[in-house]
Image (tube, helix red, strand yellow):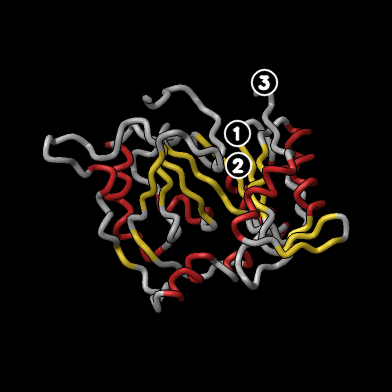
Amino acid sequence: MSMPLQKVFVSIIILFIMSANWNPWHGCHKYSEGCKNCYVFRGDLKYDRDTENVVKTQSFNMPVSKNRKGEYKLSSGELVWLCFSSDFFLSDADAWRADAWKMIKERSDCNFLFITKRILRFYDCIPPDWGDGYENVTIVTTVENQKRADERLPFFLSLPIKHKCITSEPLLEEINLSPYLNETIESVVAGGESGENARECRYEWILKIRDACVKNNVPFSFKQTGANFIKDGVRYNVPRKYQHIQAKKANIDFRPKFRF
């Protein structure tokens, strides 16, 4: 499976047959409303680990690690989920990011995707040779409410990025994304919040985002209900193992037959 050179549409919840996780550093700081019940903090709490302590991981060089034959351990063509135990644009990682970019460029035969709430730091975090973007990098911006959508997305749309996606997860209120859905947005994902203290997610909020995507011919995926889900006025406490399943059963994902 080789890396396509032409522009591709990438949905952040579609798992390719070949995929890998790469967390070059671990730890983060709560940044906006969506961070309140962050899964990284919840996970670290179980192991008495301080999430505020941002550290370089042992897997930092994963993309370019080789076996005894001198071959890359990471297979060509893989989709690499990047920095899902931190934020790739976190300021604490400024000293390490340049080396991470070098590895991403070296592995141009693989696709790298990361989600960030810190898109406003974009120009402080890209490599000198970024130009109009690396073909093998997808950047996804999180917008959990209207305030963050209006703050982040106008800037996001202006940026030189080859592949752009939006995720509204956890979705905390009704959001109007219509002003920000143009031909540069390759997909939108929405979903509720997980965890014991999950804030509510209403089905009508999900449908509003879907309707905006359909109107603007942008692919849409309903990723998960979250643990505290309200539909038709009824509140459902959804166990973790069913949150993705129930979202899939809703059958509201949208894939345009033709795209620009």
Q: What element carries label 3?
A: loop
State which mark lies toward you, 1 or 2: 1
Q: Label 1 belongs to which residue? A: 184
Point out residue 53 in the picture as x, y percentages from the top left corner: 37, 73
* In-front residue for pair 239/92: 239
What amino acid is at disc 1?
A: Thr
The residue positioned 33% from the left and 41% from the top of the image is: 104
Q: What element carries label 2?
A: helix
The residue positioned 60% from the left and 42% from the top of the image is: 157
Does the rendering let one see residue 97? Answer: yes
Tell me if residue 52 comes above or below residue 233 in the rendering. Answer: below
Image quadrant where one finds the C terminus: top right
Mark number displayed over residue 157: 2
The residue positioned 66% from the left and 68% from the top of the image is: 198
Q: Do the residues labelled 2 and 3 touch (CB within 8 Å)?
A: no
Point out residue 22 in the picture as x, y percentages from the top left corner: 36, 50
Point out residue 142 in the picture as x, y percentages from the top left corner: 59, 53
Mark number displayed over residue 258: 3
Tell me if residue 176 comes above or below residue 10 in the rendering. Answer: below
N-term-proximal mark, 1 vs 3: 1
N-term-proximal mark, 1 vs 2: 2
